Structures are given as structure tokens and as C-alpha cells.
Image: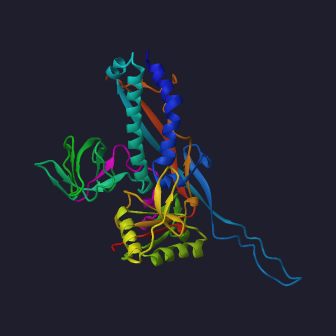
């Protein structure tokens, strides 16, 4: 007979390893290239010494002259709080009782819930990789109160089923109220919610954020490449120019020479070797058109997780839905580490149980948790090209 105990054992022994692998390797091609480590985690924070520049104890001299003065490596300390990443599944008591005498039906029930959890977690974790940590999904240019249609500036970060909150765009949530996205017209950039917010939407300032995620997400590329930010990982960028990555705007036509210029600059200035290129699907198509105009073959390579990618001089070129339409990143993934307190684990109660009844409701929930943040040791070794239009 299927019981909550057998369900817990299945989640712990059968599903946990599979889910962790799916989220760590197969969720996103970029994530699959980034190493994960529990080093430099101290309590609730990541504290990491980051070297910059070169050792100064080098020099030439005469046969009997003075030796070079020692001048060791330069370091700054990065400090970042571990971000709390959660994923919750829910199973009704009725569904469990209906499958008590049918192990196959219960396995199908768990499989469906876990597949949904993996899909949602992969979507949101991939989105965070390219975000700025704020949790902001989009701005709201206009609202049609009569039809309930909400016009947004971008639907890249949105998916049916997401639970969102209103953010005033400056400092705080408008309220604790949440709503769920039930409809998306991607061509017209229109969404509808399962109910209207009690507070009116201020289209000039308000934005949507993922529920409970305001300023709680990992430090993604959006933050690393934020040219308006004055600090990164608690270090003043104005005093440490190596914290500012290579950024070229208004690129126009994408070409090998534009990409190679960025790669050469990173190599010459910081010694960084680009091993991963990622861009929007639009930029990928523009680059394919560029190659076709010279009747050049498109080389294809296979990455970890089964992903296939174009190749530029042996460097994979991968498109990602969460990148702005006119943007390309050229990265040295060896400079990135996902520092974590632990890998994905089930949240356990004091009694060791991972499946718990929701108080006041005939449903049971189980929650996956991971405490982590993304650190880039050498931001100046990364590049961003934007304004790619043809």
C-alpha cells in the first residue's frame, strides 16, 4: 500500500539525485559550464579573496645589484549573502488516497509533480542567471482596465502560471498581494492575471516581480554588467576598475571582427580566454545570416547536458531566451563559481519529515531548497556586445 512514508522515501532516494542533476547540468547550457563549490561559504555569507593585477616582485638588475623588492599579489574580499532558492510541489490528500492501492498510479502522480517542479525551477534559475538579482520581470507601459489586459515591455521572463507581485519601481512592493499569470499574448506583449490587484497599477513606475523574490535572487550577469552600479560584491567599482567588464554598445552589424575584437581585448588586458558565447535567438539568426553571406559552413558542437551549439573558432555560440534581443555575451566560464551551502535538498521538519500538510487545507507539500550565489572572480574578463541590429 502506498503511504506518505513510502512517498517520502521515494522523494529522498529516487527523485532527489535526478532532480539535482537536472537542475545543475541540464537546466541551462551556461549553468552546465559553471563550477559549483561549497568553499568560501562562512555561515550565511560567501567571503572570497579575489586577486587582481600581477605580483610586483619582479625586476631585472646588475650582477651584484639590489634584488627586486617583494610586492605580493593584490586582493580584495568579495562578500555576498547566500540567496535562498526554493521549489515546492503540492499533492492533495484525495489524490494520495485514490492511488493508495495502485503503486503505478502513485508513481505517475509523483512523476508529473516532479517534472513540473523541474520545468519551473529550470525556467526561473535560468532567468536568474541573466538577471540583476532584483527579481524584476518587466515594466508596465499600459493597462486596459475594462478587458483586464496588461501591456508589458517584455515577455521574455514571463510564463503562464507564474505568481507575481507589484513593485513600485524604486524601493518596495506595493503590497503583499499576489496574482497568477493566466494568459500571455507574446506578439502583442499582453498578459492577463487570475484577478486584478486591489491597488491600482501605476503604469509610469510599477513593475512585476516574482513572488517574495524582490532583491533576493542570485547575482546574475545583469548585475555584473550593470554600468550604473557603483559596487559589486561589496567592493567599490570606482576604486577598482577591473570590476568593470568590457561593454560595447551600438554595435550594429554582427561580424567575426566585432567578436574577435572583444575576445582579443579580454586576452590582452586581463589574460582572460573566452570559452562560451551566448546571445539572443535573434542575434544568433543574424550571425547565421552573416556566415551565409560569405557561403561559410556553420560548425556544430555538442555541450554537456545534450545541448547543441554553433561554433566560433571552437567556442560554442548558444542562444538563450532570457537575453535582450540585441545582445551577445562573451564569457570565460572558469571565472564563475556558484558557491553553495549545500546542493539541492528537501526541506525537513524537526521530525525529519519532508512531506507536510498545509495547515487548514487537505493538501501536502514538499519543498526543495538550495542556498547559493554566483560569484565572478574577474568581471573585467567578460564582455557584452549590445545594439546588434543587422
Q: Residue furthest right?
A: 64
Image vertical order of residue 145 relative to residue 90, above or below: below
x then y, percent, for residue 4:
44, 20
| Rendering colour mode | rainbow
- Asked whether, in this view, residue 254 is left or right of residue 330, the answer is left
Question: In this view of the protein, can residue 76 be seen by the observer?
Answer: yes
- Asked whether, in this view, residue 122 is left or right of residue 170, the answer is right
Question: In this view of the protein, can residue 324 be seen by the observer?
Answer: no
Determine if the magenta segment contains residue 208. Answer: yes
At a point 39% along the width and 73% down the height, the residue shown is 292
Q: Quadrant of the C terminus?
A: bottom left
Foreground residue among 315 and 267 = 315
Image vertical order of residue 343 relative to residue 307, above or below: above
x then y, percent, for residue 248:
43, 74
Q: Residue furthest bottom?
A: 62
x then y, percent, for residue 286:
36, 70
| Stretch in magenta | 204-228
Image vertical order of residue 324 relative to residue 193, above or below: below
Image vertical order of residue 187 relative to residue 114, above or below: below
Determine if the magenta segment contains residue 243. Answer: no
Count of numbered badges drawn on the protein: 0
Specify the quadrant of the image occupied by residue 85: top left
At a point 86% along the width and 82% down the height, the residue shown is 65
Q: Report the predominant secondary structure element of the magenta stretch.
A: loop
x then y, percent, for residue 208:
29, 51
Q: Quadrant of the N terminus?
A: top left
Foreground residue among 280 and 74 = 280
Amino acid at each position: 500500500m502506498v503511504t506518505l512514508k513510502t512517498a517520502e522515501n521515494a522523494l529522498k532516494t529516487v527523485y532527489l539525485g535526478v532532480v539535482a542533476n537536472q537542475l545543475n547540468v541540464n537546466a541551462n547550457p551556461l549553468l552546465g559550464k559553471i563550477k559549483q563549490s561549497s568553499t568560501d561559504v562562512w555561515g550565511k555569507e560567501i567571503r572570497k579573496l579575489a586577486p587582481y593585477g600581477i605580483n610586483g616582485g619582479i625586476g631585472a638588475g646588475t650582477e651584484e645589484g639590489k634584488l627586486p623588492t617583494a610586492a605580493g599579489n593584490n586582493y580584495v574580499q568579495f562578500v555576498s549573502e547566500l540567496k535562498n532558492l526554493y521549489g515546492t510541489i503540492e499533492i492533495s490528500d484525495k489524490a494520495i488516497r485514490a492511488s493508495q492501492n495502485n503503486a503505478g498510479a502513485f508513481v505517475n502522480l509523483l512523476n508529473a509533480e516532479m517534472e513540473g517542479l523541474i520545468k519551473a525551477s529550470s525556467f526561473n534559475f535560468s532567468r536568474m542567471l541573466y538577471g540583476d538579482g532584483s527579481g524584476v520581470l518587466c515594466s508596465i507601459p499600459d493597462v486596459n482596465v475594462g478587458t483586464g489586459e496588461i501591456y508589458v515591455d517584455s515577455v521574455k521572463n514571463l510564463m503562464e502560471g507564474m505568481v507575481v507581485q507589484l513593485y513600485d519601481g524604486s524601493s518596495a512592493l506595493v503590497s503583499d498581494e499576489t496574482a497568477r499569470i493566466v494568459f500571455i499574448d507574446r506578439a502583442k506583449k499582453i498578459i492577463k492575471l487570475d484577478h486584478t490587484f486591489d491597488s491600482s497599477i501605476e503604469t509610469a513606475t510599477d513593475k512585476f516581480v516574482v513572488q517574495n523574490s524582490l532583491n533576493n535572487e542570485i547575482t546574475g550577469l545583469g548585475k555584473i554588467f550593470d554600468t550604473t552600479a557603483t559596487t559589486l560584491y561589496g567592493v567599490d567599482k570606482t576604486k577598482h576598475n577591473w570590476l568593470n567588464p568590457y561593454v560595447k554598445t551600438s554595435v550594429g552589424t554582427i561580424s567575426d571582427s566585432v567578436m574577435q575584437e572583444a575576445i582579443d581585448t579580454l586576452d590582452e588586458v586581463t589574460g582572460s580566454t573566452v570559452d562560451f558565447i551566448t546571445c539572443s535567438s535573434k542575434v544568433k539568426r543574424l550571425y547565421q545570416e552573416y556566415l551565409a553571406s560569405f557561403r561559410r559552413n556553420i560548425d556544430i558542437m555538442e555541450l554537456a547536458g545534450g545541448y547543441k551549439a554553433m561554433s566560433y573558432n571552437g567556442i560554442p555560440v548558444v542562444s538563450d531566451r532570457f537575453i535582450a534581443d540585441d545582445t551577445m555575451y562573451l564569457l570565460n566560464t572558469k571565472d564563475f563559481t556558484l558557491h553553495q551551502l549545500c546542493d539541492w535538498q528537501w526541506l525537513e521538519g524537526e521530525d525529519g519529515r519532508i512531506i507536510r500538510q498545509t495547515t487548514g487545507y487537505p493538501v501536502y507539500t514538499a519543498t526543495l531548497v538550495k542556498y547559493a550565489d554566483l560569484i565572478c572572480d574577474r568581471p573585467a574578463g567578460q564582455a557584452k556586445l549590445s545594439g546588434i541590429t543587422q
